Image (cartoon, rainbow, N blue to C red):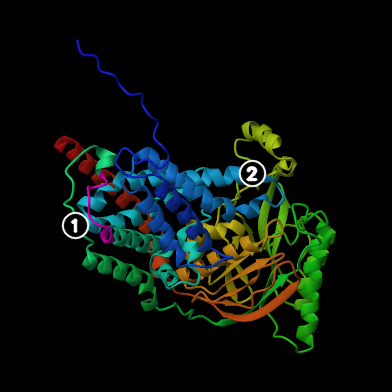
Amino acid sequence: MTVQTLAPATPPSPSAPAPGGRRLWPALVLAVLSGLALLVSFPPYGLWWAAPLGVAGLALAVHGRRLRAGAGLGLITGLVFFAPLLSWTNLHVGYAPWLLLAVFQATYLLLLGMALAWASPLAARRPGLWPPAVALLWTAQEALRDRAPFGGFPWGRLAFSQDDAPTLMLARLGGAPLVTFAVALAGGLLAAAWLALRPAAADPAGSAAGPGPARPVGGPRRGAVAAYAGAALAVVGVGLAVPAARPDGAPVTVAIVQGNVPRLGLDFNAQRQAVLNNHARATVDLARRVAAGETARPDLVIWPENASDIDPLRNIDAAAAIDEAATAINAPILVGAVLSGPGAGQSRNAGLVWLPRQSTYGPPAQMYLKQHPVPFAEYLPLRPIVEPIAQAITNQAKLLRTDFVAGTAPGVLTLGPAKVGDVICFEVAYDDVVNATVRSGAQLLAVQTNNATFDVAEATQQLAMVRLRAVEHGRDSLMASTVGVSGFVTADGSVHDATEFNTEAVVVRQLRLGTGSTLATRVGAWPEAAAALGAALVLAGAGVLRRRRKRGA
């Protein structure tokens, strides 16, 4: 009888090839580099051209991998990207909420990594379909992240990294989804160029779907490399052919008052009367300069969100301070105010139109209520369940004893000669809120915000969103912040008179009212819906290829 001796199994080393014959550590490095490239494409770094490189890096990292590896690599890219991008959220509430938010946002790139790995057989069987497949999957991932859960959190969309890029002008045709699609398509084309540059060996997609026939071994396909790289450059530069909208309405002179706060942080409004007084005093000082002929008289004045955290509809002193400022400047003021009610334990984040010599009692003639309060910042979803958890992970849960009630109507307000579209703080990130405001008749966009609880990185990221919205809807726009950055944005996306952070400032500029509509305004959410449908077809098509390969094996 012959006895066979079996050698003991040796665990694979970290550098050993994966089951499909490919080492994992280069993919890990590529996933990290992908996250870093995405990060530096956003303000305050502003290297917009790095965004397509980040997309290409993740697509290559997960190409031909199993779904589990794709998920892990996508998660790594997401953590490297979102943790530093959202670091401004930990300045005053501690590390736990920041890390939870970053991890949660990274899970969407985990799903994207799985989807890209699932669809990677397209790169081998239909190379020309791979770049648009990457773009469709990326756009669909953002569509999901922008909506779920609790209304979503769109921070970190590829479109918001393109404020200085030629691709920004594509927003006029299809809004933020089209800009994201273009950036991701350029990244997919770069990934395809790299795959064509490498010598063709066994089809790596076989490792994801089982063994199958390999491609013939050959050298780099230099013609395909040049075609893919040239197409990527063309996609990035095509926005140069899109003309900027030119508002065709009358000119108006607008003043932004950035009154500043006594101190930054969550207790910025501990001296609420001081914050209100800062904005009132700065407006009265502006009136003196107007009377002296030092600056133009504004047709309307914009105060930021939280300029009056004392309800001026219930507090006579707050109302008197605002009325004194409006009477001195003799122009309507859009006042960012926190109002009590309507019920017990409830508040409202509002933009109030305050006219000179207005009655200090009763509801104002016009008011906009923020439609999209921020979950876990302005209200607690599922309060009985979430509140004990929030108290356990942060000592700031007491700040959410009241819930902000959402408004139900777009913020189109008449201030002097202009119909102003009021958008409060993070609402500028949501396509539907801004689109509905413009379609309801807004001739000018005003973003009221309060950056006193964050830093200059958050403020500049938000200003980039204002720039995209100005181009998207062909509207001159502005951002008014308590502490900065405040400034004007014309319909071509250019920034004017931007203020410094954490300073008191008043800036005055002439803008033009817009009356027409762009293609992006008219089509609304249809481009994103089409991308979501296209992504579903990509996943279904990849599934068909996998089943065919399995039968062939």
Q: Residue at x 30, y 68 (%)?
A: 231
Q: Residue furthest bottom?
A: 293
Q: Which residue is mark 2?
A: 97
- Name the side, left or right, on which 141 lies relative to 63: right
Q: Which residue is mark 1?
A: 218
Question: Which secondary structure, mark 1?
Answer: loop
The disc labelled 2 sits on which kind of residue?
A: Pro
| Relative to 191, residue 473 above or below | below
Q: Which residues are magenta?
A: 196-205
Q: How many marks?
A: 2
Location of residue 486 (image quadrant): bottom right
The residue closer to the viewer here, 464 or 361, is: 464
Q: Residue furthest left?
A: 552
What main secondary structure does the magenta stretch of the protein show?
A: loop
The picture places residue 167, in percent across and down from the top left corner, at 42, 70
Q: Earlier in the sequence, mark 2 or mark 1?
A: 2
The residue closer to the viewer here, 332 or 10, is: 10
The picture places residue 134, in percent across and down from the top left corner, at 34, 54
| Relative to 388, residue 434 above or below | below
- Say which of marks 2 and 1 sits in front: 1
Say whether marks 2 and 1 touch (CB < 8 Å).
no
- Name the side, left or right, on which 493 lies relative to 375: left
The residue closer to the viewer here, 211 or 513, is: 211
Q: Residue at x 64, y 44 (%)?
A: 97
